[in-house]
Amino acid sequence: MTIQDSPCNTTRFLLIGKQQNVATGCDKTSLIFAAKHTPGALHRCLGHFAQRGLNLTKIESRPKKNDNWEYYFFVDVQGHRNIPEMIQAIEDLRSDATFLKVLGSYPMHRQRLETAPPDREGLNLI
Protein backbone atom coordinates (compact mmCIF):
# COMPACT_ATOMS: atom_id res chain seq x y z
CA MET A 1 0.00 0.00 0.00
CA THR A 2 1.32 3.44 -0.96
CA ILE A 3 0.80 6.41 1.34
CA GLN A 4 1.61 8.94 -1.36
CA ASP A 5 1.92 8.60 -5.09
CA SER A 6 3.65 11.84 -6.09
CA PRO A 7 7.44 12.21 -5.92
CA CYS A 8 6.90 15.98 -5.46
CA ASN A 9 5.07 15.61 -2.13
CA THR A 10 6.73 17.47 0.71
CA THR A 11 6.13 17.94 4.41
CA ARG A 12 6.32 21.41 5.89
CA PHE A 13 7.97 21.86 9.28
CA LEU A 14 8.05 25.08 11.27
CA LEU A 15 10.66 26.31 13.69
CA ILE A 16 9.15 28.89 16.00
CA GLY A 17 11.26 31.48 17.77
CA LYS A 18 10.93 34.86 19.43
CA GLN A 19 13.39 36.75 17.22
CA GLN A 20 12.60 37.90 13.69
CA ASN A 21 14.57 36.67 10.70
CA VAL A 22 16.41 39.31 8.71
CA ALA A 23 15.39 39.77 5.09
CA THR A 24 17.36 37.63 2.63
CA GLY A 25 15.79 38.92 -0.58
CA CYS A 26 14.08 35.56 -1.11
CA ASP A 27 11.58 35.40 1.75
CA LYS A 28 8.05 34.36 2.50
CA THR A 29 5.66 35.81 5.11
CA SER A 30 2.89 33.77 6.74
CA LEU A 31 -0.17 35.32 8.31
CA ILE A 32 -3.66 34.44 9.47
CA PHE A 33 -6.71 36.65 9.21
CA ALA A 34 -10.49 36.60 9.34
CA ALA A 35 -12.55 38.59 6.85
CA LYS A 36 -15.76 40.43 7.55
CA HIS A 37 -18.87 38.47 6.63
CA THR A 38 -19.90 40.77 3.77
CA PRO A 39 -19.93 40.40 -0.03
CA GLY A 40 -16.45 40.92 -1.49
CA ALA A 41 -14.68 41.03 1.90
CA LEU A 42 -12.18 38.27 1.07
CA HIS A 43 -11.52 39.86 -2.33
CA ARG A 44 -10.75 43.20 -0.66
CA CYS A 45 -8.45 41.53 1.89
CA LEU A 46 -6.42 39.65 -0.71
CA GLY A 47 -6.43 42.62 -3.08
CA HIS A 48 -4.10 44.56 -0.79
CA PHE A 49 -1.31 42.14 -1.76
CA ALA A 50 -2.14 42.13 -5.48
CA GLN A 51 -2.19 45.95 -5.61
CA ARG A 52 1.44 45.95 -4.45
CA GLY A 53 2.64 43.14 -6.71
CA LEU A 54 2.99 40.64 -3.84
CA ASN A 55 2.44 37.03 -4.88
CA LEU A 56 0.29 34.74 -2.73
CA THR A 57 1.85 31.27 -2.71
CA LYS A 58 -0.73 29.64 -0.45
CA ILE A 59 -4.20 30.33 0.87
CA GLU A 60 -6.03 27.90 3.10
CA SER A 61 -9.23 28.31 5.08
CA ARG A 62 -10.08 26.71 8.41
CA PRO A 63 -13.38 27.08 10.28
CA LYS A 64 -13.40 29.04 13.52
CA LYS A 65 -14.03 26.70 16.45
CA ASN A 66 -17.00 28.49 18.00
CA ASP A 67 -18.46 30.43 15.07
CA ASN A 68 -20.43 28.47 12.50
CA TRP A 69 -19.79 29.56 8.90
CA GLU A 70 -16.88 31.81 9.94
CA TYR A 71 -13.35 31.07 8.76
CA TYR A 72 -9.71 31.91 9.35
CA PHE A 73 -7.53 32.29 6.27
CA PHE A 74 -3.89 31.18 6.39
CA VAL A 75 -1.86 32.95 3.72
CA ASP A 76 1.76 32.74 2.55
CA VAL A 77 3.05 35.73 0.59
CA GLN A 78 6.37 36.12 -1.23
CA GLY A 79 8.36 38.87 0.45
CA HIS A 80 9.62 39.82 3.92
CA ARG A 81 7.34 41.51 6.43
CA ASN A 82 9.72 44.50 6.62
CA ILE A 83 9.69 45.51 2.94
CA PRO A 84 7.61 48.64 2.26
CA GLU A 85 5.07 46.86 0.01
CA MET A 86 4.36 44.20 2.66
CA ILE A 87 4.17 46.74 5.48
CA GLN A 88 1.54 48.73 3.57
CA ALA A 89 -0.42 45.64 2.47
CA ILE A 90 -0.58 44.34 6.05
CA GLU A 91 -1.58 47.76 7.40
CA ASP A 92 -4.39 48.05 4.84
CA LEU A 93 -5.47 44.45 5.50
CA ARG A 94 -5.77 45.35 9.18
CA SER A 95 -8.58 47.79 8.33
CA ASP A 96 -10.55 45.15 6.35
CA ALA A 97 -10.00 42.10 8.56
CA THR A 98 -11.78 41.27 11.81
CA PHE A 99 -8.64 39.46 13.02
CA LEU A 100 -5.03 39.57 11.82
CA LYS A 101 -1.82 38.00 13.08
CA VAL A 102 1.48 38.02 11.21
CA LEU A 103 3.08 34.66 11.99
CA GLY A 104 6.48 35.66 10.65
CA SER A 105 8.86 35.91 7.72
CA TYR A 106 11.47 33.35 6.78
CA PRO A 107 13.70 32.38 3.85
CA MET A 108 11.87 30.55 1.07
CA HIS A 109 13.02 27.09 0.15
CA ARG A 110 14.01 27.12 -3.50
CA GLN A 111 14.33 23.89 -5.41
CA ARG A 112 16.54 23.97 -8.47
CA LEU A 113 14.80 22.95 -11.69
CA GLU A 114 17.43 20.36 -12.62
CA THR A 115 16.98 18.55 -9.28
CA ALA A 116 13.17 18.51 -9.38
CA PRO A 117 11.72 15.07 -10.00
CA PRO A 118 9.72 14.86 -13.24
CA ASP A 119 5.95 14.70 -13.01
CA ARG A 120 3.99 11.90 -14.65
CA GLU A 121 4.12 13.54 -18.09
CA GLY A 122 7.90 14.00 -17.85
CA LEU A 123 7.74 17.77 -17.21
CA ASN A 124 9.64 19.42 -14.39
CA LEU A 125 7.25 21.34 -12.15
CA ILE A 126 8.40 23.70 -9.43
Image (cartoon, helix red, strand yellow):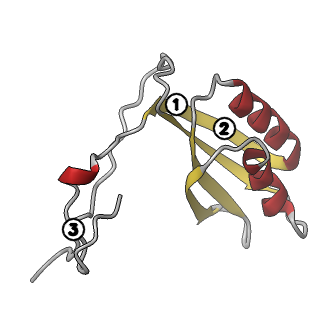
Badge nearest the viewer, 1 or 2? 1
Q: Hey, what amino acid is under mark 1?
A: Ser
Which quarter of the rendering shows the C terminus? Answer: bottom left
Q: Hey, what amino acid is under mark 2?
A: Lys
Badge nearest the viewer, 1 or 3? 3
Q: Secondary structure at mark 2?
A: strand
Find disc 3 in the rendering and name its residue.
Answer: 118
Q: Say few, some or many: other residues with alpha carbon within 10 Å of mark 3 (under 14 / 14 to 19 / 20 or more).
A: some
Q: CA distance from mark 1 to mark 3?
A: 30 Å
Find disc 2 in the rendering and name its residue.
Answer: 101
Q: x, y (%) of residue 112?
A: 27, 46
Direction bottom: furthest residue = 1
Q: Secondary structure at mark 1?
A: strand
**Residue plotted at (80% across, 62% down):** 43
Q: Are marks 3 and 2 in contact (CB under 8 Å)?
A: no
Q: x, y (%) of residue 115?
A: 19, 51
- Sequence-wise, the earlier of marks 1 and 3 is 1
Q: x, y (%) of residue 84?
A: 72, 25
